[in-house]
Image (cartoon, coloured by chain):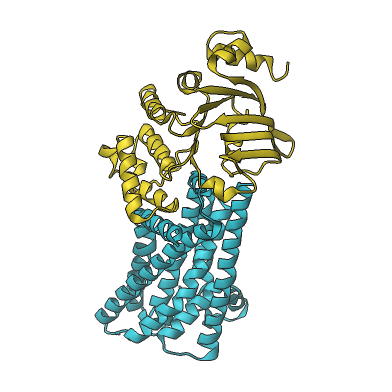
Chain colours: A yellow, B cyan
Amino acid sequence: MLAVETKGLVKRYKDLTAVDSLDLSVNEGELFSLLGVNGAGKTTTVRMLCCLSEPTSGEAYVMGKSCTADMAQVKSVIGISPQDTAVSPRLTVRENLMFMSRVCGLDVQGSKQRTDELIELFSMQKVVNKRAKTLSGGWKRKLSIAMALIGRPQVLFLDEPTLGLDVLARRELWKVIESLKGKITIILTTHYMEEAEHLSDRIAIMIEGKLAALGTLSEIEQQAGAQGLENAFVAIAERGVGK
Amino acid sequence: MNRKLSFSWRNIKELIRDPLGYIFCVGFPLVMLIIMTVLDQSIPKDSVTVFHIEKLAPGVAVFGQMFVMLFTSLNVATDRGGAFLMRLYATPMTASDLTAGYILPMLIVSVVQSVITFTAAFIISVIIGSTLNIGAVLLSMLTLIPSALMFIGFGLILGVLFNEKAAPGMCSLIISLGGFFGGIWFDAESTGGIMLKLCKCMPMYYCTKAARSAMALDFGGSVFLLPVGIVIACAVVIITLGCFAFSKKMRADIG
């Protein structure tokens, strides 16, 4: 089964077409990166797939469920770590995780068990009783991803997870994301080419809301006629869509 | 139900861990209670009856509830601004789970605030030799529950309509207007004319009047039943509008 599928997906805001006839398919267990400059339509695409924005037209499916007709079912199989860390600032790390697990429908015992599992998975033992607002950017991002994983989602959306992090924190987070590879499907949006290059199974490049290139790193390099993802991205971006 | 309670619990923790919550929701009303009692003791007896402890305590309790409105608006606006609500929108939580999760903890905070204010007022009344009737105190506290809901509804609306910077400003405006036209710091009944008409246009006036009548154990139609009826009607309308505004905003956010 495809984990994510879009068919002619369109999102318009008045005069602006943020996403234009997007056709994508992501396999189960794949780490799929959406690349693009600011305003390319990456976050809008993620929002539509997470039922946070209604498509103007076209169809979007997550684990075979329609993002417009079966919203409750889609929400029960996804997890999202938004661009902003979106944690509860005065709750501790443990309390944030417990809260999200209860929201995801786990009982008290199940919540405690799942919280402990994620604290161990993310090596958060030393910050577990710290309030979220006192955490560094890297820890906040880890907590944000852990909160997204609490309901055992089948598809995880990471919207620019390493934005604003220093190089060490970014590398640390890459390890976390790598540890999830193959276990669940991950849709990653990022500005950082080396991040997409390092983590992704396949990459989609979006330009002005349209899909400009899609494939593995080597396939993208081939399509662009350039070596390295950054060079390939620049070549594709300069060429524009359909030029 | 679990989701509502979990979200309520989260909101209570957020509030009780904010030092500003104690300063504004508890400290400020208590300070006003003490200052106005000192003032009352310093002026000729019966020259200004509104500062007598049996009238002051219900007024200050209403004043304190307006700060609960401020914190409700701040809580909603901050969650919206920081994408926390966006994360929750992507879960099975519904608009009614979220609104109940905002209203319930604030109602509890408001009741606790009333208990603290009236306990302090009772202690003060004993000290100044004008002991309050405990039954009247309890009735006055009960009378304040609909007004608490009304102010929470105002907070919900302002938190939906304004961001975390603008919402407190708008609440301050309502607190100032409410403090003035609610007859908390002066006897509105004794003014008459356009001033009394303006006071009667503000729901805060009826909150204060109902709570003071309950404290005086005066349950007459015009001094208790009518004001209580008006406050309950306002509470129902405002809280319904608040829930509607939140639900509409949620739909717009995911539109």
Quadrant where the image shows the N terminus of chain B: bottom left
Residue A166: image x %, image y %?
Answer: 39, 24
Q: How many marks?
A: 0
| Residue B227 shows up from this direction | yes
Residue B77: image x %, image y %?
Answer: 51, 51
Choose top left, top right, bottom left or bottom right for residue B7.
Answer: bottom left
| Residue A90 shows up from this direction | no
Q: Is residue B26 above or below residue A48?
A: below
Q: Is residue B151 above or below residue A221?
A: below
**In this orientation, which residue lies closer to the viewer: B160 or B54?**
B160
In the rendered structure, the answer to whether residue A29 lies left or right of residue A62 reads: left
Q: Residue at 43%, 75% (x, y): give it.
A: B59
Residue B129: image x %, image y %?
Answer: 26, 84
In the rendered structure, the answer to whether residue B72 lies left or right of residue B33 reads: right
Q: Residue at 34%, 66% (x, y): give it.
A: B31
**In this orientation, which residue lies closer to the viewer: A228 or A162?**
A228
Q: Is residue B229 above or below residue A176?
A: below
